[in-house]
Amino acid sequence: MNVILYATSSDNRKITKALNQIKAIPDVKIKDDADDVINPSIIVGTFAGWDNVNYIYISDFHRYYYAKAEVLTGGRIQYNCHVDPLMSHRSALLSMNAIIDRAENATNPYLVDSELGMLNYRSQKTIAFPSANAFNSNLTYVLTVAGGGGSL
């Protein structure tokens, strides 16, 4: 199987990672011939830059992996890998339409979120019409006001 070794400093939570290719190695064998797709280990000979590798693509599995190097005897390096599901399935994830119920940084006031604290204050917005001839006879406007009385 073909393996491409990379270095990346991208956040693990990013779908698309910035990759710097270090080396491509053809005909790599999985350690002990185990077909563990989630946590494979591969053994390769040493090469320049082996210690910079922290990300791997295994073509037979069509997956990207986080990798940690372990030095073995006889000038060999073992990379213990763990699958990166975001990068491995990024095309499917990026083409998906979804309503996100919870987000780490962004909120949507139109989605109910029991973990978001509620504030009680008056919200008033003044929005100007885009042009001076906004009130011509060809257009219809609907103004909706919600809330209790009181003067502004």
Image (cartoon, rainbow, N blue to C red):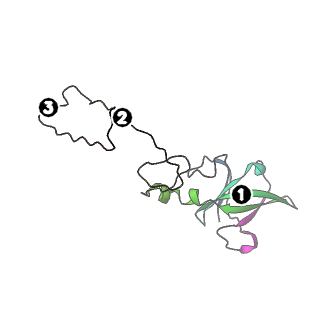
Placement of the C terminus among the 4 image quadrants: top left
The residues bearing labels 2 and 3 have C-alpha atoms spaced at a distance of: 24 Å
Disc 3: CA contacts within 10 A as few (<14), some (14-19) or many (>=20): few
| Farthest-out residue, top | 132
Disc 2: CA contacts within 10 A as few (<14), some (14-19) or many (>=20): few
The residues bearing labels 1 and 2 have C-alpha atoms spaced at a distance of: 52 Å
SS label for mark 2: loop
- Who's the residue at 33% across and 43% down the image? 148
User: What segment is highlighted magenta in the picture?
Assistant: 27-48
Kind of residue at disc 3: Asn
Task: Give the residue at mark 2.
Answer: 125
Kind of residue at disc 2: Lys
| Farthest-out residue, left | 137
> On the image, which quarter does residue 70 sit in?
bottom right
Depth order, front residue of 27/79? 79
Q: Which mark is residue 67?
A: 1
SS label for mark 1: strand
Task: Give the residue at mark 3.
Answer: 136
| Farthest-out residue, front | 150
With 112 as the anchor, is 67 left or right in this view? right
The residues bearing labels 1 and 3 have C-alpha atoms spaced at a distance of: 65 Å
Position in image of residue 146 (x %, y %): 31, 44
Depth order, front residue of 144/2? 144
Position in image of residue 142 (x %, y %): 22, 42
CB within 8 Å, label 1 to label 3 = no
With 138 as the anchor, is 81 left or right in this view? right
- Who's the residue at 78% across and 50% down the image? 51
Position in image of residue 93 (x %, y %): 49, 58
Q: N-terminal of the two: label 2 or label 3?
A: 2
